[in-house]
Image (cartoon, rainbow, N blue to C red):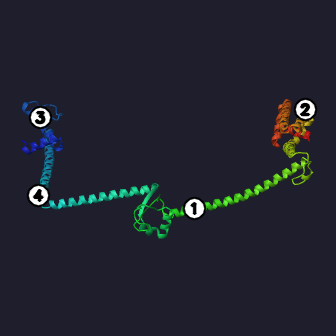
Amino acid sequence: MTLSEKQIDQVRTKVHYSEVDTPFNKYLDILGKVTKLTESIINGNLSNDDSKTEALTEQNVSQMKESIQLRFLDLQSSIDTRKAADENWETCQQETLVKLGNLGSKLPIIKGIHSKLLLRIGKLQGLYDSVQVINREVEGLSEGRTSLVVTRSEWEKELGGDLVDLLIEKNYLKLVDSGLKKNTTEERYRVYDDFSKGPKELESINISMKCDIEKVRQEVSSYKDKWLRDAEIFGKITSIFKEELLKRDGLPAEGEGENNDDDYVSDEDEERKERFKRQRSMVEMDRIQSMDEKEESVHEYVDQEEEENEEEENEEEDDMEMNIEETKEDTEAGGESGQQEENDETRKGTEDFMQEQDAIGETTERDVYQSAEKHGGSASDYSASSSAEEVK
């Protein structure tokens, strides 16, 4: 069976493009088996083993015959399919060539359409550029302050003549073209401001600011009234304290006894004596008042400890009494410097008393601090209160 030139071309094409044709390969395979069997028969090299496929048996021959017929039919159908595809392709190509030949008269129309499309694309590009410019301007308006230049007629159309005159008077609208005549509609005025917010938003902001200002004004007035009332109360308290201090020093109140002063005492000596007495009385009053409060807070504990530590406390109280008497004499003689020495001596006596209390025992010390904390005082407060009692 010889192959035609077309079949040879197909084989070459398949080899060139590495196209796998399964029916054709199967048909060649069965032809190869038949060729080997015939070659064995001619050469006399037949195998006596019936199990081999090359054995010349009736069963093997019938199977080869059926396989050859089936694969030949499969290959034939594949070739017919390819022939139909080639014919369709040739037909379509011929029709395309005919249409291309007829398009010669329509080429000017296509060129006109192409030119119109180019014009429309150019217009769209210009529109896109203008939209970009507007977007940049809007973005600049939204970011912060910007300038706007409009003629006077347009300003009056948008805002009204009275408002435009007021804005020009307030120098909010500034004239750009100074060469033109004034009060004409062709004048251009420039404004520089933040246009990112609309009128409604600005009105709401203005209303909220007014409400906040009113609230602040009300709060300031209420606080002012409270401060005035408190200041009046403190003034009264201060005047009462001054009168009480003058009474304790044996001096008459303000406005009384001014005519009883001796003529030979100078005003400077009198002021110095009064200032010294006032300072001394204020210091003594504060010290005695604090000591009285602390004495009350530890009174219960003093009663319990007096029975157990009577001897030791008597010795310490004698020492404290001597120290307090000395500091008191220094205070009367030296004024403010004596008061400082008195505080130092009192502090030393308090430290000695605390050391003696620590020597009594850890249990006694713990009770002292617990009872003192419950009543708002401490062991040092107790010693200070006892010294204050001796001073009295």
Q: Earlier in the sequence, mark 4 or mark 2?
A: 4
The kind of residue tagged 3 is: Lys
Q: CA distance from mark 3 to mark 4?
A: 57 Å
Give the mark toward the camera: 1 or 3: 1
Amino acid under label 1? Ser
From the viewer's perspective, tell me whether residue 186 is left or right of residue 46: right
Give the labeled residue for mark 4: 101
Instruction: Report the residue that reaches farthest toward the front.
Output: 264
Q: CA distance from mark 2 to mark 1?
A: 73 Å
Identity, as a three-letter code, of the amino acid under mark 4: Gly
The residue to which callout 3 is attached is 36
Q: Residue at x 50, y 64 (%)?
A: 169
Q: Is residue 63 visible?
A: no
- Nearer the viewer's eye, disc 4 or disc 2? 2
**What numbered label is drawn on residue 208?**
1
Q: Nearer the viewer, residue 232 or 202?
A: 232
CA gap, disc 1 and disc 3: 108 Å
Circle 2 residue:
319
Q: Residue at x 71, y 58 (%)?
A: 224
- Whichever of labels 2 and 3 marks the residue nearer the N terminus, that label is 3
Q: How many discs mark residues in the rendered view?
A: 4
Q: Depth check: give the residue in front, 340 or 46.
A: 340
Check disc 4 and report its element: helix, strand or loop.
helix
Q: Where does residue 92 sit, x and y in percent of width and height?
A: 14, 55
Above or below for 167 versus 57: below
Left or right of 295, for residue 159: left
The Cα atoms of the two marked residues, 4 and 2, are separated by: 139 Å
Residue drawn 46% across the image and 68% down it: 159
Q: Earlier in the sequence, mark 1 or mark 4?
A: 4
Q: Secondary structure at mark 3?
A: helix
Q: Foreground residue, 89 or 38? A: 89
Q: Mark 2 or 3, which is nearer the eye?
A: 2
